[in-house]
Amino acid sequence: MPRLLLLPLLVCGLPHAFGSESPPDISVVGVEAVKQWSSSRLQEAESGFSGSRMDSPTSWNSQVIYQIQVDRYQNGNLSNDALNIPPIQQEHQGTSDPEGIQAWRHGGDIAGIKARLGYLSHLGVTALWLTPLLKHDGSYHGYCTVDPTQLDPGFGTMDELRELISSAHSMGIRVILDVVINHLCDPHTSYNATPSHTDCANGLNGKFWSSQAGGVPAQGQLEFSTGFFGPFRTQEFFNRCGADSHQDMAGTDPVAVYGDFTNTMFDYNTRDWDFQQIFADIHKWWIAAADFDGFRLDAAKHVTQDYLAYFSTDVRKYAATLGKKNFLLVGEVAAPATWEGTRVGRMESDPNDPDKRDQSVVPNGLTSRLWNIKADYLANQAFAFPGLNAVYDFAASGTARSVLLEQSSSDKIQSYYQSNDYNTVAGQADPTLDWTMLEIHDWPRYLSNTAGAMHNPYKSVVGLAHLLLQQGTPIIYYGLEQGFNGQCPQLSPSLGSAKQGVQSICSQHADDSLNRQDMFAGPWILGSAVPALDQQAYVGTWTPREAPFSWQQDPILNTTHEVFIAARKFVNIRLSCIALQAGISQFSWVGKSTGSLFGFSRVSEGKEVVVLINPSATQSTSMPAKLMLYGTSAGVKFVNLLDQTQTANSVSDGGSVYLSPSGAVNIGMNGAAVFVPASNLGKCDEDLGTCLCKQ
């Protein structure tokens, strides 16, 4: 479809052409008018924002992230529960056959998050990652956006969002919005000319590598519905290669980048520079209007790198004008290290001379874009690179999870940090910024389906210790601090004829809903390793209830058990010790069997912290006689923050410096030790049950 170029007079005559209430139809007004609309709308948001803005942290590795699956966290406003619910829920809710209840919207919302800010502050987390809030197709998870200019009504209003962010900021908690960057959903749009799937993707990929614009003959033709999002209603803004299979999406062939997620998730043509500008302006609006502190970019594997470079650079530049000089862009790149490397930081290129690049992995399309935006990214004092600030370190996280659950030998962690894959990504930007986790919404719960672990709260304790003491920026997925294990309880008779389908999901452990249990009185309250919480598990029909008056009255927010106590303890230790935020992990002891002790040092600003982790659920172990030190001279006394009676001294031997225990130091089952120089020992907090580093 040719783009329409309309005269400014004609554009201004269109009703709502620049207003925020009715987005223009690009097929009617043309691309230049939509660019003007998105820019004007952004200016309106800036002038309409009242109140103070929160600045950025100096470094995001100083943060502890808490991920919230919004629909499953807390129902704070019952009046929005019936808004934008999926068709299957509309059909079956209130009947004797609640089919698909695990995938219904359960009522969690923005108001529910705000009601729990006191709890989150008490836990000590410093940033929230919220799953997508923008208007979607009704699916509870929010990852099927249909209109990126609106909040989903089932999650709340703009006033509620602003109140949430303002209240979080007043407690020192930043807020990160999850943005779907690779596709737009529309259940009523389809192809009226079928694409040649593989030929289409290969053809577009060839054009990107040679830095050519335009399409290919193998592309299909979309028949847009009447409700399709107007500013994107043009063939040129979509790849039109047809739906991927699961194998396509998991792979590294061109279809993984250019194919549609599903039949109704249409993949953006992210090579189009007009699209890039409009998409960025639409999402910058959310920073201006609501004061978000960062974006988590969903499916960053499935887009072209030039798009990530432009979006990251442009959004950081804009946020800096609002005082957010270190706005965070972190991407989900579930792909090999070579793919991650071309999407983060330097992007396998020389920022000052993009022609100097690894030509085997850097397409010409990326290089052209880097030259175009070079002045902008070099001018950013906090992050003078074009790519994402960070990616998920899925490899480190998966390896650690396996070791902590005693499924792999402990030396696998060290092996990863010495691997080519790690070095590939770490060479592009500060690797301590990369996000690490034990579980997220797309992974089974850490304690799920593991004999001996799912009902062992101390396995959660050692997991939290490692997560918060190891290299990387940690994500606590909601409920990890409450020992959630994703296990179904005995099913309620209220499920009626839907019981068999739910039982199948529970027994096969093969559905994402098991990773996303309700953390309030909903229909999908799964199990916990904490007995008092496990007794509250319930799966069946439900009547929505008001949230408790205060979070302290909420029975599911139990803060007295060993898992929550450990989470709070290790969060506060991390936040007090600069080395645990910024130091690279350097291993000093590694066992070569499952369940064996391992230890590592982290050094920053002349401060060294030595961490010992015992993942064994059956055996305690002694601290080794000598642990290599990496930033401390001989003659320094160290103290275990968790037990100040345990001390050690740095000694010189053969030209190296080691840490040696002063006496018997025992690391209990699923236990940890955190040794710091006595000169760095700060206050000891009886409530936390630990000492902290000196601030």
Image: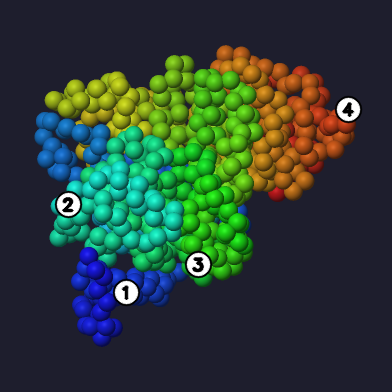
Earlier residue among tags 4 and 3 = 3
For marks 4 and 2, the one nearer the N-term is: 2
Is 439 on the left or on the right of 386, as rendered? Answer: left
- Disc on res. 32: 1
Q: Name the residue under label 3.
A: 372
In primary-sequence order, the first of circles 1 and 4 is 1
The amino acid type of the residue labelled 3 equals Asn
Q: Quadrant of the N terminus?
A: bottom left
Which mark, residue 276? none
| Disc 1 secondary structure class | helix
| C-alpha distance separating marks 4 and 2 | 74 Å
- Identity of the residue drawn at 61% across and 61% down: 353
- Cα distance, mark 2 to mark 3? 35 Å
Can residue 583 be seen by looking at this rendering?
A: yes
**From mark 1 to mark 2, how far is it between C-alphas?**
27 Å
**For the residue carrying disc 4, how many other residues have a C-alpha within 10 Å: few (<14), some (14-19), or many (20+)?**
few
Q: Where is residue 198 in the image (x, y as percent from the top left)?
A: 30, 43
Disc on res. 193: 2
Secondary structure under the numbered disc 4 in the rendered image:
loop
Question: Does 14 sit above or below residue 508?
Answer: below
Amino acid type, mark 1: Glu
From the viewer's perspective, is residue 153 above or below residue 257? Answer: below
Q: Earlier in the sequence, mark 1 or mark 2?
A: 1
Q: Which of marks 2 and 3 is nearer the N terminus?
A: 2
- Return the disc, 3 or 1, that comes first in the chain's sequence: 1
Q: Where is residue 467 in the image (x, y as percent from the top left)?
A: 56, 35
Q: Mark 4 points at which residue?
A: 654
Q: Residue furthest top?
A: 618
